[in-house]
Amino acid sequence: MENISIQRKKIATLRSAAEKSADDFYSALQNWSLSQSRTIEGIKAPTTAELQALKEKKNQSLNALNESLSAFNQTFSQQSAIEQISGELPIVLFPVRIECRYVNIKHVVRNVKLEDTVDVSQVEILNNKLKTTGFVKNDQGRFVYSIPSLHRNVQGNPGRLNPLALKPAGGKFIRRINDIPELRLRFYPDEISIENREKNLQPGEWQSGEQFWTNICGGKDPQEEWIRFSLTMQVPRAAWIIKCTQPTNFKPGIPLPETPVFPAEKNFRDGAYTTAPLASLLPDRFVVRLYKNNVFKEFAGNPISEILATGIDPTEDPFEQDENSGMQLNGKSVRTPNYLKWIHDFDEAVKKGMAISVNLLEHPEYSTGVEKIIVTGVKLSTDEAESSRLLESLFENHKYQESGMKIIPKGTPTNTVSKNITEQKMKEDEATLYFNADFKKQPLSKLATDESRIKTALGIGKLFSFPNGTMTELSEAALFNRNLWPATWGYYLLQLFTPAMR
């Protein structure tokens, strides 16, 4: 068996190539769109042929990555892969939403041709039988079709009915398929696993960001300007705009430059919604344990795609060449694009690894219920360095998307807000946390900060900062426990469980 580290390096290389090709296509598409609307003059835009080539390259890179992941999952089971992982490696547990239901799969024949049917009202035996069992005629005067009653009648009267009388004109019988009871489990990514941030800036956002830096380099108070700027939009978005437009000659903790030098490369986007929300850092596959009478069975799902869209992707078909690429009316229903069918189509969810079906004919012990269900999954296809990189990218996404992310003090009410705090005051407080995290140089502390503990445990880079990350509550709690131990549990254990030491 090939060493797991070799496979991981191959996958990391393919993942980097897929990310780069996706970024290249996205940036080129935004430049093309801006050139068409003439929003920005002089922007270098690709031709439609060049865009098509970039999109094809993006799809090829993603397919190569998914094929490598599929090969990895075929080579290593979850158990065999875990056995090659160091026991000292921390594992971050993310929640997942689970939907469980019992269903009875019935096979229904649709769009039956007239030549494949039989008018049973013309068969005297069946005509009388149908009348006595309460069946009704449809608009064409034909009795409503019922396989079970029909079969019982034929089997109960073998000598009185010639089966050939029921043979359709087309010469084809419809084969009956028995119902199949199933326990179906579906998995939906939790909010923490979904990346929903627009990385590129609109032209107006870029101009407002440059104006912020011009104002503070011109002598205005940085914190006051930061708060004022944050009140015009969502605080995390304002912090992201300031970060993207940060002058190349600025460094935290040193005097501001008199003349800011802005980045030469400006990544624009044409519109408010240009990227699809994507579920990232999902496990390689989900494994379900069903418990009954203190005994469990495991059921593994299919490998999960590296990129799983959870919303409409405006870059999927920019030239509207595929009528199935967007939301379409289909009679009285709405037809979703193929990449979103896993959300509502169970069979598609199974293919994507986001659902598992348990056949209750093969596992009848679960027909009357399950005592406990455990769903787990590990992303074993990434090594320590790649996992840290992906995790930091996910944290950065949450930090700067609309809802934001920060470390909250202990005792913070998460479901209630004081009526005495206005929305403006809440935004000002949040803006101050982002200002301290992104603009100010982090103060030295004798105790390890909560932020440093998280980054050390998860391998997050030193340059990443959490709003409110300078708290030292974990270190203070550790010191408090150390001081209390001799007078509480330490004394109790020493006196009652170590008599030989007295």
Image (cartoon, rainbow, N blue to C red):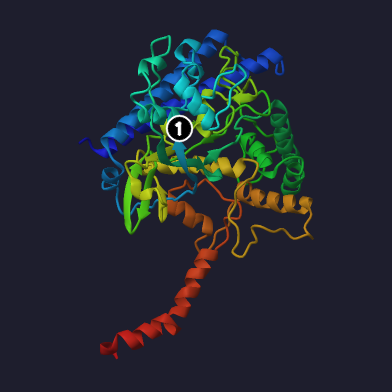
Identified at 66% across, 49% down, the residue is 435
Instruction: Compare residues 482 and 186 and report the one nearer the observer.
Output: 186
Residue at 35% over, 38% down: 381
Is 164 left, or right, of 29 in this rendering? left
Q: Please give left or right for residue 221 compared with residue 266 in the image.
A: right
Q: Is residue 10 visible?
A: yes
Residue 119 x/y as whole percent: 49, 16
**At x 64% / y 58%, what residue is drawn?**
414
Give the quadrant of the N terminus.
Answer: top left
Amino acid tagged 1: Lys
Outermost residue to the bottom: 502
> Whole-percent x and y of residue 191?
56, 44
Q: Position of residue 116 (x, y in %)?
A: 45, 13
**From what the image shows, is residue 118 above or below residue 477?**
above
Quarter in which the C terminus is drawn:
bottom left
Above or below residue 87? Residue 55 is above
Left or right placement of residue 202 versus residue 6 in this view: right
Please indicate whether residue 223 sits to the left or right of residue 6 in the image. Answer: right
| Count of marks overlaid on the render | 1
Quarter-of-image position of residue 181: top left
The residue singled out by tag 1 in the image is: 106
**Residue lying at the far left of the rendered structure:** 1
In the image shown, does 201 or 170 lie closer to the viewer? 170
Res 141 quadrant in image: top right
Does 53 appear above or below 202? above
Within 10 Å of disc 1 (Cα), the crowding (few <14, some 14-19, many 20+) is: few
